[in-house]
Amino acid sequence: MSKFRKVAVLTIGGLLLCLVAFVVIFHKELAVAYHQNRMRASLAQARKVDPGNPKQRESIEAYEKHRDSLVALGYFERREFPLLHISVPSLKSRRLWEELRAAFPDHTDVMMQGYEPGTRDMIVVWDRPQNLPDWKKIISAHDQPASGRITGDVGDLSKFIGTWVDDEGESVYVISSGPEGSINIAVPANDTWRIEIKNARVENGQIMFDAYHYMEASNDLKSPIDKSGEHPFSGVRCETILTVHSHDSSRMVYKMKTIHTPQPIVEILRRAGEVDQRK
């Protein structure tokens, strides 16, 4: 064998060994990239076909196969979130779904179960493991029993006790003390809205909770687009923060935001029966 051929053989052999080593070392990354690419292609194909066409079912099955392969590789994790206080279908389940879609607008690997008879009400998510706590946070915020009570070692909350009113003098919140240092947050009865408080807690000296306002469906709100008659704000989660002013205990800052209001709505409430100390 000539010197040139020996060098060529050794070079090719070395390249093959490098290629094999590359595949061995980056096998998982290559597999993940392959299944991601095939998932996207299958989904794009499914969207091109009319519903009911057998080819759409084939594309969806291919999509699910590659998604499950990503779970097997550890890239995705499949997580079930059973709904204990929300029935499917319902206004509450729709509002939860709307918030999930707003929080994860480009995520396709999520579904809500419970529409078919005999299926359990739940949210099923396929996502990166590090993202699952974000899903859990939103789902848990909705799927809670209504309660305005805060218990446990929450410190001195006496500054919050009282009836808090708006600029027009109408009661917004009534905060009262309970047994063993607990406090209760209540909303005065309203002829228009029924309000539920969930996930009440204390963080950094502030009272935080999620408020859900419900209005009975009305024929006046029906339209060709939305035939439900439901108010668009009904059942939307309102993340709420109450903070007593550090220099004026007669004032409390009320902050509220929803998926529709990314910038908080801020209002100053006043403790009923006390003179506002603002100069």
Image (spheres, helix red, strand yellow):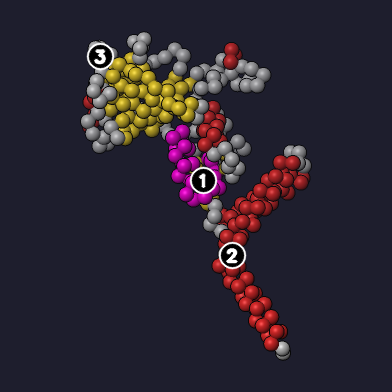
Could you tell me residue 186's position as x and y percent? 34, 22
Please state the horizontal and vertical placement of residue 190, each as a whole percent of the image.
42, 14
> Which residues make up the magenta segment?
121-143
**Distance (Cα) linking label 1 and label 2:** 29 Å
Q: Earlier in the sequence, mark 3 or mark 2?
A: 2
Q: Label 1 belongs to which residue?
A: 80
Of marks 1 and 2, the one in the foreground: 2
Left or right of residue 9: residue 187: left
Q: Nearer the viewer, residue 76 or 183?
A: 76
- x, y percentage for residue 206? 31, 30
Q: Main secondary structure of the magenta part?
A: helix
Q: Which residue is mark 3?
A: 279
Q: Residue at x 29, y 35 (%)?
A: 204
Left or right side of 144 for 113 = right
Residue lying farthest to the front in this orientation: 4
Measured Cα–Cα span from mark 3 to mark 2: 69 Å
Mark 1 element type: strand
Q: How many marks?
A: 3
Q: Does the magenta run of residues contain 5?
A: no
Amino acid on which disc 2 is placed:
His
In the structure shown, which secondary structural element does the residue marked by tag 2 occupy? Answer: helix
Are the residues flagged by discs 3 and 2 in contact, CB closer than 8 Å? no
Q: Secondary structure at mark 3?
A: loop
Please name whichever residue, 22 or 115, is drawn nearer the observer in this view of the structure.
22
Which quarter of the image is occupied by the C terminus?
A: top left
